[in-house]
Amino acid sequence: MTDKRALRSEMRARRMALAKDGLQAAARAADHAHRLPQATCVAVYHPIGSELGTAPLVEALVARGVDLCLPVTLAPDAPMIFRHWVPGDPLEADLAGVPAPFPVAGTVVPDLILAPLLAFDGQGRRLGQGGGHYDRTFAALPDAIRIGFAYAGQQVEALPFEPHDIPLHGVLTETGYTAFA
């Protein structure tokens, strides 16, 4: 089995190189937002480091009349919750240090969760940062549609898969949307 730590290091470097085209790639990905599965409430994320930026996609989703929410980490080994969010709402750091809506925003359950990643393969496998936040959340919300949001260059031939890993239903990149069987 591939060493996930070594693979994460390699994929962080690859994503950093891909991020040099970040603004243009994010805008091109947003051009394909109409191909996403239908949803009334979509969970986006606040990009950290070299993750593909969500601002153009957020604009496209708002234009479609979709409600948005952001993930919130409340405990290190628990699934994330989601709070309603409108662009421009104030944010505070959650337990993971990621900007998140204040509790007054209200908790919601998204129909579709857009997740950042380090790598993905053609079978819908996702390599995340290693904290398990999204896998625990996917397990807690099995009916939510799970979509990776990434640079096309983050695709690899195959990723290691463990029993706790939960595959994606699709991935949205600057080259389009791909659904997985």
Image (cartoon, rainbow, N blue to C red):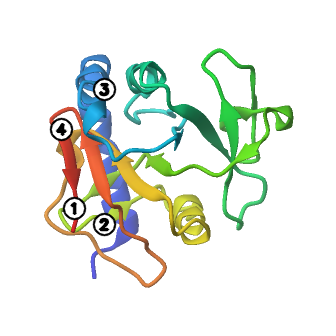
Q: What secondary structure is marked by label 4?
A: strand
Q: State left or right for residue 149 relative to residue 87.
A: left
Question: What whole-number distance in Å separates the C-alpha atoms at marks 3 and 4?
Answer: 9 Å
**Residue denoted by label 1:** 121
Can you identify the residue that label 3 sits on?
30
Q: Residues within 10 Å of mark 4 (few under 14, many from 20)?
A: some
Q: CA distance from mark 1 to mark 2?
A: 6 Å
* Amino acid type at image mark 3: Ala
**Numbered badge on residue 12:** none
The residue under label 4 is which amino acid type?
A: Gly
Tag 3: Cα neighbours inside 10 Å, few (<14), some, or many (≥20)? many
Q: Quadrant of residue 136?
A: bottom right
Q: Nearer the viewer, residue 141 or 64?
A: 64
Q: Residue at x 43, y 46 (%)?
A: 116
Q: Secondary structure at mark 3?
A: helix
Disc nearer the start of the sequence (4/2): 2
Residue under the point 51% across and 65% down: 143
Q: Tell me the SS state at disc 1.
A: loop
Residue 112: image location, x then y, percent = 47, 49
Labels 1 & 2 near each other (Cβ < 8 A): yes
Distance between the alpha carbons at the discs numbered 4 and 1: 15 Å
Of the two numbered discs 3 and 1 on the same chain, state the one appearing first in sequence. Answer: 3
If you read the primary sequence from the N terminus, does the residue marked by circle 4 or circle 1 appear first?
A: 1
Callout 2: 10 Å neighbours few (<14), some, many (20+)? many
Q: Where does label 4 land, which residue?
A: 176
Q: Nearer the viewer, mark 3 or mark 1?
A: 3
- Res. 125 mark: 2
Residue 77 left/right relative to 130: right
Q: Quadrant of the N terminus?
A: bottom left
Q: Is residue 36 above or below residue 129?
A: above
Tell me the distance, in whole angstroms, between the alpha carbons under discs 4 and 2.
18 Å
- The one nearer the camera, 22 or 170, is 170
